[in-house]
Amino acid sequence: MTEETAVKKPFCISKDEINLLPAGSFPGKISVVSSHEGAERAARFLSGSRMLGFDTETRPSFRRGESHPIALLQLSTDTHAFLIRVGRTGVPFALKRILEDRNIIKLGQGLKHEMVLLHKELGVRGEGFIDLLDIAHRLECSPRSVKAMAAIFLGIRISKSAQTTNWGRSFLTDKQVLYAATDAWACLKIFHEMRRRGLVGDAGKRHR
């Protein structure tokens, strides 16, 4: 052959291909938690889970050197997502125990910085976390965002339009609530699908 044929890698997707997919979002129950007692109850509910989707949201910074603390911590099962406003709730013991329990797997994406913030801001030494970004690198996914991986592995297009909104506002909008729940849930579902296809082991590679 005098001409090389470009072969598309199996876990790559273009922006145009993503835009053609049906929209998808978290289909279950969403609980926004704004009190210490509510966070304690949410943690007790989640403590029986073997795997959880995980994410955090922080008020965006638009000036150089500006930073904000974690405003929201999301934990999701397949059917119930809890959006915990940690700036108001703090981290009750039951929640800290989940985040530090290596036997409860927490799935997220791009966790390196979040692990630092959990420790620095909330006093949590995260255990049992699996970073989908590590798996995406190994599988040569492109792009490696949650949106792209949801398209590749779940066949859905998730909206990121609420990503840079104000997560510290008094009341979260319906759009923010659905976005936050979807991001955590999608990480869990992506991992389930990766494992169903035999692309990862039972536990994957855990952080810490």
Image (cartoon, rainbow, N blue to C red):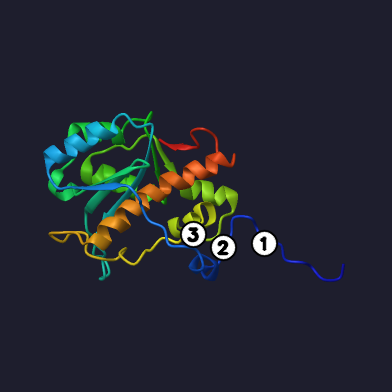
Query: How many numbered circles are shown?
Result: 3
Say the numbered circle drawn on residue 13: 2
Residue 41 x %, y %: 18, 35
- Marks 2 and 3, the one that precedes in the sequence: 2
Q: Quadrant of the N terminus?
A: bottom right
Which residue appears farthest toward the right when viewing the image?
1
**Pointers 2 and 3 in contact (CB under 8 A)?**
yes
* Amino acid type assigned to the residue bearing label 3 in the image: Ala
Q: Nearer the viewer, residue 165 or 176?
A: 176
Say the numbered circle drawn on residue 8: 1
10 Å crowding of disc 2: few (<14), some (14-19), many (20+)? some
For the point 22% across and 43% down, the residue is 122
* Amino acid type assigned to the residue bearing label 2 in the image: Ile
Residue 129 x %, y %: 39, 39
Say the numbered circle drawn on residue 148: 3
Q: Secondary structure at mark 3?
A: helix
Q: Nearer the viewer, residue 153 or 132?
A: 153
Q: Secondary structure at mark 1?
A: loop
Relative side of 126 to 143, left or right: left
For the point 28% across and 48% down, the residue is 117
Question: What whole-number distance in Å separates the C-alpha atoms at marks 2 and 3?
Answer: 7 Å
